[in-house]
Image (tube, grey):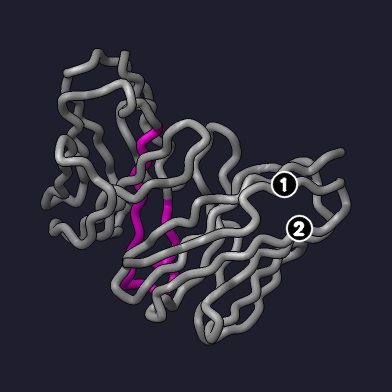
Amino acid sequence: GENVEQHPSTLSVQEGDSAVIKCTYSDSASNYFPWYKQELGKRPQLIIDIRSNVGEKKDQRIAVTLNKTAKHFSLHITETQPEDSAVYFCAPKTSYDKVIFGPGTSLSVIP
Amino acid sequence: DSGVTQTPKHLITATGQRVTLRCSPRSGDLSVYWYQQSLDQGLQFLIQYYNGEERAKGNILERFSAQQFPDLHSELNLSSLELGDSALYFCASTNSRRLSGNTIYFGEGSWLTVV
């Protein structure tokens, strides 16, 4: 079956530093690679995504990079702020609509 | 507001009981997903429906069942409840027919507490 891993599982950074979270997947049919942010007690929400025909996408302080050959994609957050503290999930999706979320990475930004 | 509606928002029930969680997907979305999230845990995929039919099954217990109705709303039935079933249950929807349909939209969740 599909296997989705995230590294690290927890990450603590100083405010203003960068954070990188990596997602590794096993299903070579995956063609859509989103990252979701979940704040405490709230629902997960999409923050950025990338499709399989693109290598990198940036939206202000966040970016996602994709290495389809190696089957991993990463979330990059620059100039981190306390409000970036949350749990981040990757959720690679196959062409058959199946979505498996990674185990999550808990990011803490220390003021 | 994601457009996905879940009821009830909170539910407290006793062990051994049965509950039904309801989800209305976003207008036009054909796929409905159910996820379970226990305290400090990730999103455990339970089951997915597409246009009324079961499409994929995850780690869903035999005590749990779900269905999607012709109007596309979905229900998750949890029976013979145990203390360990206490969790936040999310419903999510997507419309894979649209290019933007790859995004999963989550409801606010149903908090289930089994006592």
Q: Is residue A39 left or right of residue B70?
A: right
Tag 2, which secondary structure? strand
Q: Is residue B51 left or right of residue A75?
A: left
Are discs 2 and 1 less than 8 Å apart at CB?
Answer: yes
Quarter location, residue B62: top left
The residue drawn where x is 24% and y is 13% is B14
Residue B103 on image: x %, y % = 44, 62
Indicate which disc residue A84 carries: 1
Q: Is residue A47 left or right of residue B75?
A: right
Tag 1, which secondary structure? helix
Indicate which disc residue A19 carries: 2
The residue drawn where x is 53% and y is 86% is A69
Tell me if mark 2 has few (under 14), some (14-19) or many (20+) residues whose alpha carbon lies within 10 angstroms of its own: many
Tell me if mark 1 has few (under 14), some (14-19) or many (20+) residues whose alpha carbon lies within 10 angstroms of its own: some
B110 relative to B54, above or below: above
Q: Is A86 one of the magenta-colored residues?
A: no
Q: Amino acid at mark 2?
A: Ala
The residue drawn where x is 48% and y is 39% is B41
Q: CA distance from mark 2 to mark 1?
A: 10 Å
Please report whichever mark, 2 or 1, sits nearer to the chain's N-terminal start.
Answer: 2
Q: Which residues are magenta?
A: B88-105
Read off the chain for label 1.
A
Nearer to us of marks 2 and 1 is 2
Q: Is B90 one of the magenta-colored residues?
A: yes
Q: Amino acid at mark 1?
A: Asp
Read off the chain for label 2.
A
